[in-house]
Image: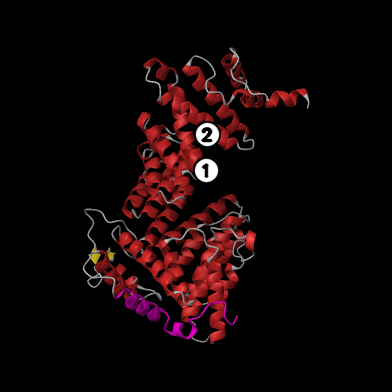
Amino acid sequence: MQKNEINKTRKVSKAPAALYDMVNRLFHANRDVDILNIESQYGRLDTFCDEPSHDVLIHYIFGTASMELKRSAWGDCTVYHYQRAMDIINSNNDRKFHTQISYLKVSFGQRLAVLYSDKGDMEKSISSYRWFLEIFNRDEMEVTDALQLCENFSEFKRYDYAIGVLEGYIDMLESIKEEEQVAIVSGLIEAYMNYGEWAKAKTVQERLRSTQAGTSHVTSEILLYMSGRIEARRCNYAAAIDNFKEAHSHVQIRRSFSGINMKGDREKYRVDLGVALLKQSAGNEAVAFELFEKELNDCLEPSDREKILIQMGAEYRNLKKWNQSIETLQLCPSATLRGESVRSHSAANKEMAQTYLEQYCSDASLDIHQRRKILKLATDYSQYVGAITMDMHLTHAQLFYFNGNENQAYTHLKQYLDDRLTECKLGCYTCKQRIQKEYFSMTCACCKVALYCDKIHQHLTWKNERICHKVLCPLLRYWRRVKAGKTGEGRCKEVFRSFFENICPRGKTCMSSCYDGV
C-alpha cells in the first residue's frame, strides 16, 4: 500500500491547532479543492477547536465548498456540516456567541430547507424552514432559494408551505429585479391555484400589474397568460380563452419587433388555450389539436414534450377517441411495460390505464375477447403507477371488480370515498375553490356532501362524465351516513355492487381474470 493511501485510511482523533486559520484562509482564496481535501481528513471529528463559533464557521466552509464543487454525494456532505452547525447553534445560549455567527445562521436555515426538500425529506425541510422563520423574516431568504424551496414544496403538494415561502415578498416587489418579481408572482399564483385560492391568485396578479414591471410588454404577456389560467381553473372558459388569445397577440408583436421566430421559442399558453377550447365545446377539436401540435413542434425539452403528449392523450380520451389517445400516449418514453425501463411514478402509465379502462366500460362495439384484452392492458399499466391518489383508488376499485376480486375492489372504493368526503369539506366539488368563512356555497340537496360555488358549477359536473356526480351522488350519500353512524355497513356490498354495474353495464359479461383467454 502506498504512503498516501495509508494516510487516507488513518483515523484522526484531533484537529491541528491551526485548522481554523488554515481553512479560513483557503476559503477567502476560493480554494475549494484544498478545503475538501482537509475535510476528508478532519470533517467527521466531534469538534475542531475549543471555540464554538470557530467550529460553526469550519462546518460552514466545509459544507459550502462541497456545494460549490458538487462532487459525488455533495448534498449529503453539505447537509451533514450545515446540520452539525445548526446543532451547535441550538445548544449554545451565550449571547456573544450568537452575535459572532449571526451572519451565518440565515445560510444554514434557508439552504438546509432547500437541500432537504431536494432530497425529498419534507419533514426536515419544513423543520429547517420553521427554524429559519424563528430567527429571520421570510423576506430575508434569497430569492433563488425561495423559488427553489417553493417549487420543491409544490412538487410534494405542500402548497401551504409553498405559499408561506413566497408571501413575504409581495410587499417588496418593487425593490427586486423585474425577472425576480415575475418569478415570485408566478410561483405564488401557481401555489394559490393548486391550493384552491383563486381570489388570492387574482389579487397577486393585479399587484404585479400595478408595478412598473407590470407595464412592460413581456410582463404583460405573462400576466395575461396567468389570468387565463386562473379563469380556466374557475371554469370561466370564455374569459380564459380571451386572455390566452390576447397573450398570443403580445407574442406576435414581440416577434415582429425582434424579427426572430426560432424553434424552441414556445408559446406555453397554447396547450392551456387548447384545453379551454375543448372544455367550452367539443366542436373546437380541430383548432385545439392544431394548437397542441404547434406547441409540441416548438418544444425541445423531453419532459415538457411528454407533458404535452399526456395532455393530448387525455383530451382524446375525453372525446372517446380511444385509438388516438393510446397512439399519442405511447409516444411518451415512460409509457411502457418493459420491466426496468418503466418509471415508477409515470403519469403516462396512469393515463394509459385510464384510457383502456374508459374504453372497456364505454365502447359498445367490442366483443368479449377484445374487452378482456383491453381490461388486461388497463390492469397491467395500472401496476406501473407510483403513488395511489384518490383518483387511482377509484381506478383500482374498478379494475379489481371487473377482474372478479370484489374484496379488493371494495377496499379501494372505501378509501376513495373516505378521501372524497374529506376533499368535499374543503372546497367546491367542481373547481376546488377552498371554502372561506365569508364564502357562500351551495350544497347538493341529495348527498349533502358536494359543495358548489354556484348553480353553473353544479351543472358542470352533474352528468358530463361516465363517473359523474349524478352517479356518485347516492354512493356519497350512503357513505356519509355510514361514517356519521346513521346507518350500518350491512348493505355495503349491495350498494357497491350496484355502483359498479351502473358505471359499466356490460361488466357482468366479462367478470373473470384479465389473463383468462388472452
Q: What stretch is highlighted in magenta?
A: 491-518
Q: Classify mark 2: residues with Cα within 10 Å, few (<14), some (14-19) or many (20+).
A: many
Residue 55: where, in percent of width, then height?
51, 20
Q: Does the magenta stretch include residue 76?
A: no
Residue sitting nearer the eye, 145 or 298:
145
Secondary-structure class at tag 2: helix
Amino acid carrying label 2: it is Val
- Answer with the quarter of the image where residue 276 lies: bottom left
Q: Is residue 501 magenta?
A: yes
In screen coordinates, is 433 left or right of 339? left
Q: In this view, does 265 lie above or below 351?
A: above
The N terminus - image quarter: top right
The C terminus - image quarter: bottom right
Per the model, the C-alpha gap separating discs 2 and 1 is 10 Å
In screen coordinates, is 488 left or right of 392? left
| Residue plotted at (45% across, 70% down) | 278
Residue 442: where, in percent of width, then height?
23, 65
Secondary-structure class at tag 1: loop
Residue sitting nearer the eye, 318 or 399:
399
Badge number at residue 506 = none
| Residue plotted at (46% across, 81% down) | 362
**What residue sits right under mark 2 in the picture?**
79
Q: Is residue 90 above or below residue 152?
A: above
Q: Do the residues labelled 2 and 1 touch (CB within 8 Å)?
A: yes
Residue 211: where, in percent of width, then height?
38, 42
Residue at the top extreme, as displayed: 17
Amino acid carrying label 1: it is Lys
**What residue sits right under mark 1 in the picture?**
119
Q: How many marks?
A: 2
